[in-house]
Amino acid sequence: MALKVAVQMDPIERIKITGDSTFALLLEAQKRGHAISYYTPEKLALIDTQVFASMQPLTVRDQAGDHFTLGAPERENLASFDVVLMRQDPPFDMHYITATHLLEKLPDTLVVNDPRSVRNAPEKMFVMEYPDLMPPTLITRDLEEIKAFRAKHKDIVMKPLYGKGGESVFRISPDDLNFGSLFDLFSVTFREAWVVQKFLPEVKDGDKRIILVDGEFAGAVNRVPAEGDLRSNMVRGGSPKKTD
């Protein structure tokens, strides 16, 4: 059965289609015969209990530099769609959170992922439920806490709590004199707490992502950092490798 699918995402002209999961979803939806409409979060509008957006019919193709075609914009009621894909990138700020509140006004439309769950489970907080599967991790803005953590673990990584795609990820070695300057930079740039972790040299061997569908194993990919980089994100030059 063909579905009406609306995708809420970042400007499609800016995405790098190689390794972009949203683009892969769109290709597959189109392959299955579903009608796709595109809009950015700025186009959302709540009027009483109804959610509208100015959106455009979308056609995609796996061709870098020429990967999409958009039709004429039209104001649509999101309740008229079978599925809404919430796919914009963080930062996980009030703009992002407001979008989840608006999409919650669609009780009869499947929103993927559920807006309430998206809001209540930001990834770098959610994983703190599983400390046995993680390196030692600290979430704070407090300088003394970070100093104590660094004194204990020596080699650490600092990154923003609500960042994305490997942005602003720094390794601080025990004798790195840039720690104070980096703390000052983070203090000015990010209002929220930061993630501080013990550095694991094994990151050079990859960052394995395991995919579950309804709790069942469906596949896995190992993202291996580029030479001279600690970040395995594919948008930062990481390479996907087959894995168990």
Image (cartoon, rainbow, N blue to C red):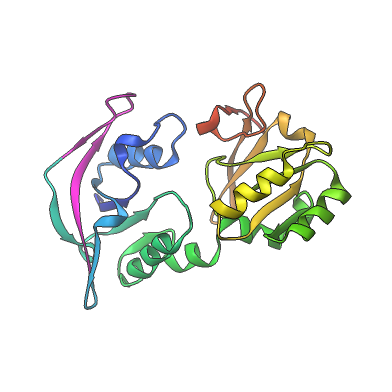
> Which residues are drawn in magenta?
51-70
Q: Residue at x 27, y 25 (%)?
A: 66
| In the displayed structure image, the side of residue 37 where residue 115 appears, left or right | right
In the rendered view, does 40 fall on the left or right side of 172?
left
Prevalent SS, magenta region: strand
* In magenta stretch: residue 225: no
Q: Position of residue 134 (x, y in %)?
A: 75, 50
Give whichever of 80, 67 is nearer the camera. 67
Residue 1: percent from left, percent from top: 26, 51
Q: Residue furthest bottom?
A: 48
Residue 65 colored in magenta in the image: yes
Please name the residue shown 83% across and 39% down the image. Answer: 174
Closer to us: 218 or 60: 60
Task: Please identify the quarter of the rendering in which residue 211 is found.
Answer: top right
Quarter of the picture containing the C terminus is top right
Is residue 141 found left or right of 177 in the rendered image?
left
Position of 37 with respect to 166 (left or right) is left
- Is residue 106 positioned above or below 20 on the image? below
